[in-house]
Image: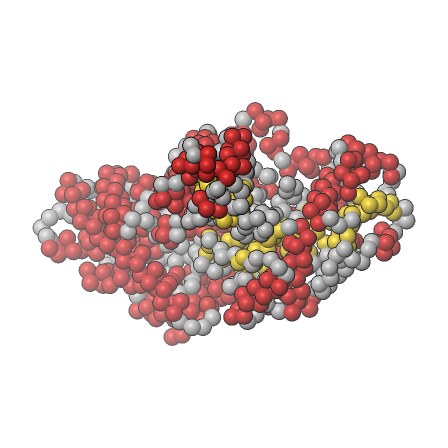
Amino acid sequence: MDHQLLHIFRNTPVGRETLLQSIYFCKKVGASPVIYVPKSTKFLMYFENDVVQIDLDSSYLTAPETAVAHATELVEAGGLNVAFLEPKHYTASTLPDIPTTFDYMCCPRSVSDLTSKIGLGYIGPRVRRIVRSARFPVLITSSVFKPWKSIAVFFGGSANAINALRLGFQISRVSGMPLDVFTQVENSSPESYRQVVKDENLEEEMDRYVNDWHFFENKVFEENLYDVPHDAIVVLGAFGHGVIRNFVFGSKMEKIQSTLSNSLLIAGPNYTSIH
Amino acid sequence: MRVLKLWRYPTNWAIFRLDDRLLLILMAIIVGNCSGVASVILNRSLLAMSGWLHHFRSHWWVFVLPAIGAALSCLFLEKIVKEGAGHGVPEVIYSVSRYGGLLRFRSSFSRLISSCLTIGTGGSAGPEAPVVISGAAIGSNIAKYFSLNDRQRVTLVGCGAAGAISSIFNAPIAGMVFAIEVIVGEWKSVNIVPIAIASVAGTEISRILQGNQIPFGHHLFKIDLLNVFACLGLAVLAAAASILLTRMLRSMHTISHKVSGPLWLRAAIGGCAVGIIGLFLPVVLGEGYHAVEALIGGRYSQGLVFVALASFAKIAATALTLGWGGSGGIFAPCLVIGSLVGVTYHHFLSVIWSSALWANEGYYALLGMAGLISGMLQAPLTGIFLIIEITGGYEVILPLILVSAVTTTLCHYIEPASYYLKDLVEHGHLLRPGTDARVLSDLNVPELIERDCIIVKQNMLLRDFIHIVQKSHRNYFPVADDKTGNFLGIIHLDDIRPYLFNPVMYDAVFLGQIMNTRVEVVHPNDDLLEVLRKMDVKGLFSMPVVMNNRFVGLISKATILDQYRKELMVQTSH
């Protein structure tokens, strides 16, 4: 239970849904939530090779006098110990540095836009920067809290997909939830994907944790996504390819996030698995 | 695609794998050129803006111009680029100290625009700090783009600062010295060579785009021993002016924060006050290089009282501009105040001892400038080389060294940290390479936790515990609650020694009875410096790490020392 999840608390009904997702996730994976109640709309996150300034939507500062009480109430009701993050370092007096040494982070689809803009198909620029730079996976929550009952890992054979698969195994191991793997077959046979798994010495884990490996033969990826359980947390890798390749061929992550309303657990290109 | 990937990772190129200093030199040229261009852009923009606003100078309402400029500058920083930071140099030093020189991309242009608005409309500030942060941010982001490591990134941040200062003053040595003395804080060849090359690149770009000329005209001064000794008095005066400026800047900042209202309004109030001062003493407006030129050339004809008043006014105007939210740096104001203080001192000497053969007032203006720069920055070499290069006055080198050394010493005695470093030192954020604090800052509790501890239960009998001790190599045993698993206390081998030779007690004593419950614990997020302080105060060699009432592991002095040495070797191996 020494894994920690960073949650930026928004003291609004939308923020409550996000915190409920974090609490549920923590309970399932055995992590402790660390809650940051922002006092200003800006903060910095220094990653290994990037510094990301998060410009929060002003709703994050709603009713600061009740924020701590609301967060405490929700976390304690979830049977977890509440811990609040107090920034120790400041780049400027109104610009706190938030540590990046957590094991998970929870974000809604956007932290810098009005909540009315948040919807399917949109992940805010700051959340994308965090996913790109972070060593931890980012939990992007659905708009309303819904307990997930299984894990759906999208596996396309890339290095990032391998990371996502390992992350899926880990979540399945600690939560005891069934895991399904989904693969869109593109210009190759299902065997080639199995070979990738074999090359990575993941066969044993595949046998142990994976319930079913679904291969989508239908070329229209979005149509295949209907097969993904509505109550699964979707684990996937992101930003593994360059901008040009994504521009030409499109990105699976974009298609998934714009089609599925499930909570997403995204492993970025700098993700390093935790043990 | 593979070519593109290779391009992004030059450290993998065969030529740079041989010696990464070659890579740094190549990058230094790029960074020096970019920061040089940034400096030229700001310089040209300021010239254009002052030319454009010159027509309005005759109007009675001209005093509102600095207010408008400061307010726009503040709005730009707050609302458009959302900077949320100060005038820049401390931010650069902070990032070098704590985060391997990581700077935001927006910082590479934001201060150029905001300072142009502040200074161009008459605010009393200088363009040097903005170009330093721009250059440093350019260096940092180029390092980031090419995936260079922390150490290389810090060097490129220094290259950016050096290129910027070199370009704006056409002073390569001053740029290099400033970057190493103030920004990087480490005199090592691994830094010096790329920074020197970036200085050359920045200067060359400036010379190509703006011509090769020293900012202030060169003047010959007749200096005898009397004038050399007299500079000691000027050093004291310069130190006093430096301290006054430092404290006024800080107090204005504090006062402005007490004023309720948006930031742009505060900046406008400060700007308006500067504008009003400028109506009576135009020397306080803008960066003030024309005034410095006149003071060095001996063309500033005002008397003692007026020049002294102008010195105070410039100090007040700078504090009002920067302390109330305007954007800019303190380099140029220091030059103006220093030259005014120098001329004041010259006039004072002439009044009290008129028969002595005093050197030209320009000589004292030069020395005053060096004194103020050295006093404010507490960087004597920067002060000396800057003044020599921007005035071409090598013949004043001896008194210049004297004034810089004395001013720095006096200022350091009264204010132990320079203006740039004061806040960082107060908050423990100044972590120069190779120092104890820097080494410890790169270590954290989770990576030092020893997890191979055997957790025992409070209801365990001593007999069972002795069996565990026989198999274990540790002296400390954490005790957890049977039901909840919560951490209750710890048992050291010494705690069971009284019972060891009395077998009767083996089945009579439970661990819950002999464990030590008043234990100092560590949280994984605690600062290592704080953990070590606790260990020193309590005379402890190991402490349990506890999170959410659960025992996570032990942290010991031996492990800390071991990792400390490894980290020190990594940090000082170049």
Q: Could you say which is closer to the camera, residue B498 or residue A130?
A: B498
| Tag count | 0
Query: Who's the residue at 57% across and 55% down the image?
Result: A34
Query: Who's the residue at 82% across and 53% down the image?
Result: A228
Q: Is residue B216 left or right of residue B560?
A: left
Q: Could you say which is closer to the camera, residue A245 or residue B109?
A: A245
Horizontal and vertical percent position of residue B165: 42, 45
Asked whether residue A58 is in view, the answer is: no
Horizontal and vertical percent position of residue B415: 28, 51
Compared to A187, does B87 lie above or below?
below
In the rendered image, which quarter contains the C terminus of chain A?
A: top right
Q: Residue furthest top?
A: B18
Q: Could you say which is closer to the camera, residue A230 or residue A183?
A: A230
**The quarter of the displayed image where residue A209 is located:** top right
Q: Residue furthest bottom?
A: B60
Horizontal and vertical percent position of residue A253: 75, 50
Query: Who's the residue at 38% across and 75% down the image?
Result: B60
